[in-house]
Amino acid sequence: TASDSSPVVPKDELSSEAPQAGRKINKTHISTLNLSNIQVRQEPGDGLYNYASDSKGAKILAANKEAKGASSILNRDKDKYLRTPCSAENKYFDLELSEETLIISIAIANHEFYSSTVRQFELWGSLVYPTEEWVFLGMFEAENIRTMQMFKLNEPKWVRYLRTRMLNHYGSDFYCTL
Protein backbone atom coordinates (compact mmCIF):
# COMPACT_ATOMS: atom_id res chain seq x y z
CA THR A 1 0.00 0.00 0.00
CA ALA A 2 1.17 3.53 -0.58
CA SER A 3 -0.38 6.65 0.66
CA ASP A 4 0.39 10.06 -0.67
CA SER A 5 -0.96 11.14 2.67
CA SER A 6 0.30 14.62 2.37
CA PRO A 7 0.35 17.67 4.49
CA VAL A 8 -1.32 19.64 1.73
CA VAL A 9 -3.75 22.51 1.68
CA PRO A 10 -6.54 23.23 -0.78
CA LYS A 11 -6.23 26.74 -2.27
CA ASP A 12 -9.50 27.89 -0.74
CA GLU A 13 -8.28 27.07 2.78
CA LEU A 14 -5.02 29.03 2.74
CA SER A 15 -4.89 31.86 5.22
CA SER A 16 -2.42 34.70 5.14
CA GLU A 17 -2.09 34.58 8.89
CA ALA A 18 -1.58 31.70 11.26
CA PRO A 19 -3.87 31.28 14.25
CA GLN A 20 -2.52 32.85 17.40
CA ALA A 21 -1.21 30.54 20.10
CA GLY A 22 -4.04 29.21 22.24
CA ARG A 23 -6.72 30.26 19.73
CA LYS A 24 -9.19 27.52 18.80
CA ILE A 25 -9.33 26.47 15.17
CA ASN A 26 -12.70 25.96 13.48
CA LYS A 27 -14.29 22.55 12.96
CA THR A 28 -12.63 21.89 9.59
CA HIS A 29 -9.72 20.45 11.59
CA ILE A 30 -6.99 22.68 10.26
CA SER A 31 -3.80 23.22 12.24
CA THR A 32 -0.73 25.31 11.62
CA LEU A 33 2.45 23.83 10.23
CA ASN A 34 5.61 25.82 10.83
CA LEU A 35 6.05 26.61 7.14
CA SER A 36 5.50 30.31 6.41
CA ASN A 37 2.08 30.34 8.10
CA ILE A 38 0.59 27.63 5.89
CA GLN A 39 -2.33 25.82 7.46
CA VAL A 40 -2.61 22.05 7.05
CA ARG A 41 -5.95 20.25 6.91
CA GLN A 42 -6.31 17.56 9.56
CA GLU A 43 -8.63 14.59 9.86
CA PRO A 44 -10.83 14.37 12.94
CA GLY A 45 -8.55 12.93 15.61
CA ASP A 46 -5.58 15.00 14.37
CA GLY A 47 -4.36 12.70 11.56
CA LEU A 48 -3.16 14.24 8.31
CA TYR A 49 -5.80 14.60 5.61
CA ASN A 50 -5.09 12.11 2.81
CA TYR A 51 -5.76 13.72 -0.58
CA ALA A 52 -4.64 10.48 -2.26
CA SER A 53 -7.36 8.36 -0.65
CA ASP A 54 -10.06 6.70 -2.75
CA SER A 55 -12.55 7.55 0.01
CA LYS A 56 -11.83 11.25 -0.69
CA GLY A 57 -12.20 10.83 -4.46
CA ALA A 58 -8.59 10.25 -5.59
CA LYS A 59 -8.10 8.05 -8.68
CA ILE A 60 -5.35 6.21 -10.51
CA LEU A 61 -5.38 7.50 -14.09
CA ALA A 62 -2.55 5.46 -15.63
CA ALA A 63 0.24 3.03 -14.79
CA ASN A 64 2.85 1.03 -16.66
CA LYS A 65 1.24 -1.80 -18.63
CA GLU A 66 2.82 -4.52 -16.46
CA ALA A 67 1.42 -3.05 -13.22
CA LYS A 68 -1.43 -4.81 -11.43
CA GLY A 69 -3.60 -3.45 -8.63
CA ALA A 70 -2.53 0.17 -9.02
CA SER A 71 -5.74 1.45 -7.41
CA SER A 72 -4.77 -0.41 -4.22
CA ILE A 73 -2.34 2.40 -3.35
CA LEU A 74 -5.37 4.62 -2.69
CA ASN A 75 -6.52 2.76 0.41
CA ARG A 76 -4.99 1.71 3.71
CA ASP A 77 -5.54 -2.04 3.34
CA LYS A 78 -2.06 -3.48 3.92
CA ASP A 79 -3.02 -6.71 2.12
CA LYS A 80 -3.61 -4.92 -1.20
CA TYR A 81 -0.88 -3.23 -3.18
CA LEU A 82 0.41 -2.19 -6.57
CA ARG A 83 2.72 -4.83 -7.99
CA THR A 84 4.85 -4.61 -11.07
CA PRO A 85 7.74 -6.75 -12.28
CA CYS A 86 10.97 -5.14 -11.07
CA SER A 87 12.38 -5.76 -14.54
CA ALA A 88 9.76 -3.48 -16.19
CA GLU A 89 11.48 -0.62 -18.00
CA ASN A 90 9.21 2.28 -17.06
CA LYS A 91 7.54 1.73 -13.68
CA TYR A 92 5.13 4.58 -12.95
CA PHE A 93 1.61 5.56 -11.97
CA ASP A 94 -0.41 8.74 -12.44
CA LEU A 95 -2.66 9.81 -9.62
CA GLU A 96 -5.45 12.37 -9.48
CA LEU A 97 -5.67 13.87 -5.99
CA SER A 98 -9.10 14.57 -4.52
CA GLU A 99 -8.55 18.32 -5.07
CA GLU A 100 -5.92 20.84 -6.09
CA THR A 101 -3.49 21.06 -3.19
CA LEU A 102 -0.20 22.49 -2.04
CA ILE A 103 2.01 19.44 -1.56
CA ILE A 104 4.50 19.72 1.28
CA SER A 105 5.32 16.03 1.75
CA ILE A 106 4.25 12.56 0.66
CA ALA A 107 4.21 9.14 2.29
CA ILE A 108 4.78 5.69 0.81
CA ALA A 109 4.77 2.21 2.28
CA ASN A 110 5.45 -1.38 1.25
CA HIS A 111 4.07 -3.99 3.65
CA GLU A 112 4.50 -7.04 1.37
CA PHE A 113 7.33 -9.23 2.68
CA TYR A 114 7.78 -11.36 -0.46
CA SER A 115 8.63 -8.55 -2.84
CA SER A 116 11.31 -6.02 -3.57
CA THR A 117 10.99 -2.53 -2.12
CA VAL A 118 11.22 0.72 -4.07
CA ARG A 119 14.52 2.45 -3.38
CA GLN A 120 14.62 5.64 -5.46
CA PHE A 121 11.62 7.34 -7.01
CA GLU A 122 10.78 10.61 -8.71
CA LEU A 123 7.69 12.67 -8.10
CA TRP A 124 6.22 14.93 -10.78
CA GLY A 125 3.14 17.17 -10.58
CA SER A 126 0.70 19.04 -12.77
CA LEU A 127 -2.45 21.14 -12.48
CA VAL A 128 -3.90 19.62 -15.68
CA TYR A 129 -4.14 16.09 -17.08
CA PRO A 130 -3.24 14.74 -19.52
CA THR A 131 -0.11 16.83 -19.86
CA GLU A 132 3.24 16.78 -21.57
CA GLU A 133 4.59 19.33 -19.08
CA TRP A 134 5.06 17.67 -15.71
CA VAL A 135 6.78 19.78 -13.03
CA PHE A 136 9.61 17.98 -11.22
CA LEU A 137 8.83 17.85 -7.49
CA GLY A 138 11.80 15.81 -6.35
CA MET A 139 13.78 12.59 -6.33
CA PHE A 140 13.64 10.61 -3.11
CA GLU A 141 15.36 7.57 -1.64
CA ALA A 142 13.37 5.24 0.58
CA GLU A 143 14.83 2.98 3.23
CA ASN A 144 14.59 -0.80 2.92
CA ILE A 145 11.87 -1.06 5.58
CA ARG A 146 8.26 -2.25 5.70
CA THR A 147 6.66 0.78 7.33
CA MET A 148 5.32 4.11 6.12
CA GLN A 149 7.98 6.64 5.18
CA MET A 150 7.49 10.41 4.82
CA PHE A 151 9.34 12.55 2.27
CA LYS A 152 9.35 16.33 2.41
CA LEU A 153 9.52 18.32 -0.83
CA ASN A 154 12.28 20.93 -1.01
CA GLU A 155 9.76 23.39 -2.39
CA PRO A 156 6.00 22.91 -1.87
CA LYS A 157 4.01 23.05 -5.14
CA TRP A 158 0.36 23.38 -6.13
CA VAL A 159 -0.78 20.29 -8.04
CA ARG A 160 -3.85 18.19 -8.76
CA TYR A 161 -2.08 15.31 -10.52
CA LEU A 162 1.00 13.33 -9.51
CA ARG A 163 3.25 11.03 -11.50
CA THR A 164 5.45 8.70 -9.49
CA ARG A 165 8.33 6.98 -11.30
CA MET A 166 10.01 4.07 -9.52
CA LEU A 167 13.66 4.15 -10.57
CA ASN A 168 15.21 1.19 -8.75
CA HIS A 169 14.63 -1.16 -5.83
CA TYR A 170 16.06 -3.10 -2.92
CA GLY A 171 16.07 -6.90 -3.14
CA SER A 172 15.95 -9.45 -5.91
CA ASP A 173 12.31 -10.56 -5.86
CA PHE A 174 10.37 -10.69 -9.13
CA TYR A 175 7.79 -8.09 -8.08
CA CYS A 176 8.22 -4.56 -6.78
CA THR A 177 5.27 -3.52 -4.65
CA LEU A 178 3.97 -0.31 -3.16
Image: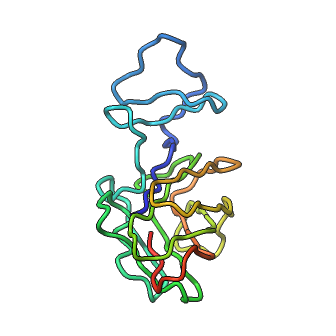
Using the image as rendered, state which of residue 169 and residue 28 is in the foreground. Answer: 169
Q: Quadrant of the N terminus?
A: bottom left
- Residue depicted at x 55% and y 70%: 118
The structure's colour scheme is rainbow
Q: How many marks?
A: 0
In percent of width and height, residue 78 lies at: 32, 62
What percent of the width, then of the height, locates residue 85? 48, 86
Residue lying at 54% horizontally and 50% vertically, measured from the top left: 150
Q: Quadrant of residue 33?
A: top right
On the image, which quarter does residue 82 sit in? bottom left
Give above or below for 29 relative to 130. Answer: above
Q: Where 79 falls versus 42 (above or below)?
A: below
Instruction: Give coordinates of residue 72: x percent, y percent.
Output: 34, 68
Q: Quadrant of the C terminus?
A: bottom left
**Residue placed at 59% from the left, 88% from the top?**
89
Q: Position of residue 64 (x, y in %)?
A: 49, 84
- For image coordinates 33% across by 52% down, the residue present is 56
Left of 8 or right of it: where is 78?
A: left
